Amino acid sequence: MLRRSWDNLSSLLLAFILSLAVWVAAVNTDDPVSQRALEGGIPLEIVNLSQGLQLVGFTAPSVNVSLQAPESTWNQLTTEDVHARLDMRGLQAGEHTLPVIVTLNAHPAILTKVDPAALTLTLDVSSSKSMQVRADRAGEIALGYQANEPSISPDHVLVSGPASAVGRVDRIRASVRMTGRREDFDQEVRLEALDALGDRVPDISLDPAFARVTIVVEQLGGYRLLAILPIVEGQVAQGYQVSGLSVSPTLVTVYSSDPQTVDSLPGFVETYPVDIAGAEENVTQRVSLRLPSGVAQVDEQPVEVRVEVAAIEITTTLKTTVETQGLRPGFFAQVSPETVSVILKGPLPVLDALRPGDLQVVLDLRGLAIGTHQVTPRLANLPGNVAVQTIVPDTVQVVISTEPPATVMPAP
């Protein structure tokens, strides 16, 4: 009796195992399981860091993970379903190697690989101190000017960070570039924490991170900044015009041992004339300044005057006979009208010299069969710097046949 019951139970158990295997195989066929890396790195979170401690020189990397999961799970899986953290609970100052803890919010899925699996970091006690801000001026201001002592607000900041980093901070710098400056400096400047060698100290926070630096710039007695006025004489060639005039530099600083002489000057100084008589192209010359006696240019920078010369543009209309090209052998073409008007735009000297015979207006008849066609005329030899505004008419009738067109006899 017991043996029969055991045989029945064994049969039922075997049947269950077989049916379960069949079910698993069917499920795996419909929803196969695969193992691969999750696309995109997982942000690493620092948790349970004790108050009064800070990380030293540590930048949390992204964590790469590999998972094993059915295809249906992979289709819905994102990086937001995976979390990575370093648990700092109970740690003291010093160096520590910690495992990267990864948790999954997607099921069914199995974590198979974490990279990196562990990280080494250093903890230090937090520290802070108040330090004075100093302006560091770089570059020379313009000649004839002087810069007063800078005003900084606020002039002290709170330096915070790991004690080892705070201890390295030697000064707080506000960098100010003054190269060529003639006017006051008044800007918000980002502050930097530097060590004794002038290198930036990492892992430091400054409160505030910016300070307003004001430096008053004054012109010295006997100096004056004047605009440069270029002088041009002569007329360009006929058919041309002056299209632009420039000078470099545009300003110049002058000096006199007698400040009243400088103060009595107008707000500009003229150049010696640049002769453009008969010019048909741009003229560039280095010239001197017309300075009064006792007044000198502070620097020796040359003054360059550039006069841009361009041809005057006009429009003109020329009538010319049209020509045909590409007509098949044995075919004849009758064109109507035989002349067209070409409206051109371009430089006056070029268009003045142009004659109707200088233009070639063609009709391209390649591939055209017997019959009546409307063909667009094309200008084949357009002179340089000249543009076609329009051709009138814009299409020409062409009758193609195998018979030559009848000759029209002039009236007696």
Image (spheres, rainbow, N blue to C red):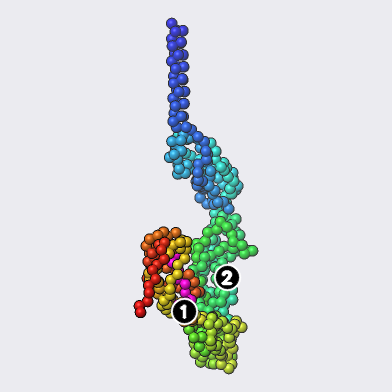
Residue 317 shows in this picture: yes
The Cα–Cα distance between marks 1 and 2, rounded to whole angstroms, is: 71 Å
Task: Using the image as rendered, state which of residue 247 and residue 108 is in the foreground.
Answer: 247
Residue 145 shows in this picture: no
Above or below — where is 203 with respect to 139? above
- x and y, in percent, of residue 162 in the image: 56, 55
Residue 355's disc is 1
Residue at the image position 53 percent from the left and 82 percent from the top: 280
| Residue sticking out furthest to the right | 197
* Secondary structure at numbered mark 2: strand
**Disc 1, disc 2: CB below 8 Å?**
no
Q: Give the range drawn in magenta.
A: 356-364
- x and y, in percent, of residue 283 in the image: 55, 82
Q: Which residue corresponds to mark 2?
A: 136
* Secondary structure at numbered mark 1: loop
Residue at the image position 46 percent from the left and 38 percent from the top: 74
Task: Using the image as rendered, state which of residue 1 and residue 129 is in the foreground.
Answer: 1
Residue at the image position 56 percent from the left and 67 percent from the top: 173
Q: Which one is in front in this view, the residue at disc 1 or the one at disc 2?
A: 1
What amino acid is found at the position of numbered circle 2 in the picture? Asp
- Of the two numbered discs 1 and 2 on the same chain, state the one appearing first in sequence: 2
Q: Does the magenta stretch include residue 7?
A: no
